[in-house]
Image (spheres, rainbow, N blue to C red):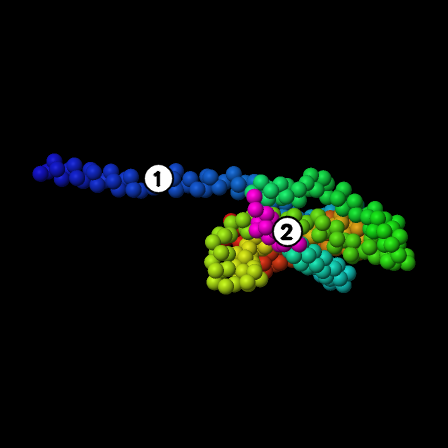
Amino acid sequence: MTLAMEQSVSTASAAVARSRPSALSRFAPYLQASPLALILGGFLLLPILMIAVVSFWDYDFAAMYPDFLLTNYTDTLGSWVTWKTCLNTLKFAAIVWALTLAIGFWMAYFLAFHVRTAAMQMALFLICTVPFLTSNIIRMISWIPVLGRNGLVNSTLVQLGIVPAPIEWLLYSDFAVVLAMVHLYTLFMVTPIFNTLMRIDRSLIEAARDAGASGWQVLWNVVIPLAKPGMAIGSIFVVTLVMADFSTVQVMSGGQSASVALMMKNQMSLLQYPAAAANAVVLLALVLLMVAGILRFVDIRKEL
């Protein structure tokens, strides 16, 4: 009896010992996540922290001086030029976002629901990505001979007698900036929306049609609600890219328009790094607020 009890106690002790997680198993998730944490910390968080620190420094025409001053922020936020530039940047972001969302959704919808074969879908999608094999600068500059005073569009309109003289606002204007940005960033909207639409169960659409729903009712009540995660991801891509773009604004507006990123670029060319860092922090906060607003209305975890 005593031997049997000892065996049962030892068996129970061994079972309890096996049920207790070892130290290695407890720290295994942290060890697995540590490489990604180191990469994100070294290449993302650390540079942002350095920019935030430099934004409080003092500077002159020759050098920067470590300090803790609020002058850079007061000069930035207290200037009407900064606020006007921010509003102009938000205007570009809103217009480009709306146009890329409309164009990107219908392109993705056509690829997902009107192209029958998977091979043709991938072929057409690859055709959309071919321009991205070239530099953004090259694709942006390619609009200049098209929209210029003696460019393709103006020459055609004048020869056809549609306009008596070349249209000046086609190039070096806000129109040219928006057109170039839509050209550059539409694919960033198409890709996540197309990925979301391809995951929609086609039986849901068939059920809606069997229930008597029209094509527009299926689109509005079934397709668009299920496509919201992809639309949100594409919106985040486009908004952040537009807010950080300075080369398109500088080249396509001919220096007649401005953005926060372009203002930062000009400050850095004048060696005003702390002022540029303060503008970068303000821009980062503005972008994060916009992204938080998007995520508040759409749960992108459904897509991930």
The label shown at residue 175 is none
As shown in the figure, which amino acid type bears the numbered disc 1? Ser
Q: Relative to residue 26, is residue 156 depicted above or below?
A: below
Say whether residue 158 is magenta.
no
Q: What secondary structure prevails in the magenta region?
A: helix
Query: Disc 2 versus disc 1: distance between alpha carbons?
Result: 53 Å
Which element is circle 1 on? loop
At x 28%, y 40%, the residue is 17
Q: Return the residue nearer the eye: 229 or 250.
A: 229
What crowding class fits label 2: few (fewer than 14 Cα within 10 Å), some (14-19), or many (20 or more)?
many
Would you say residue 262 is visible in this rendering? no
Which element is circle 2 on? helix
Question: In x, y percent, where is residue 2?
Answer: 10, 38
Would you say residue 169 is visible in this rendering? yes
Which residue is denoted by mark 1 in the rendering? 22
Say whether residue 105 is magenta.
yes
In the figure, is residue 177 to the left or right of 148? Answer: left
Q: Which residues make up the magenta segment?
A: 103-117
Residue lying furthest right in this view?
164
At x 75%, y 44%, the residue is 139
The label shown at residue 107 is 2
Q: Return the residue nearer the eye: 84 or 45.
A: 84
At x 48%, y 41%, the residue is 33
As shown in the figure, which amino acid type bears the numbered disc 2? Met
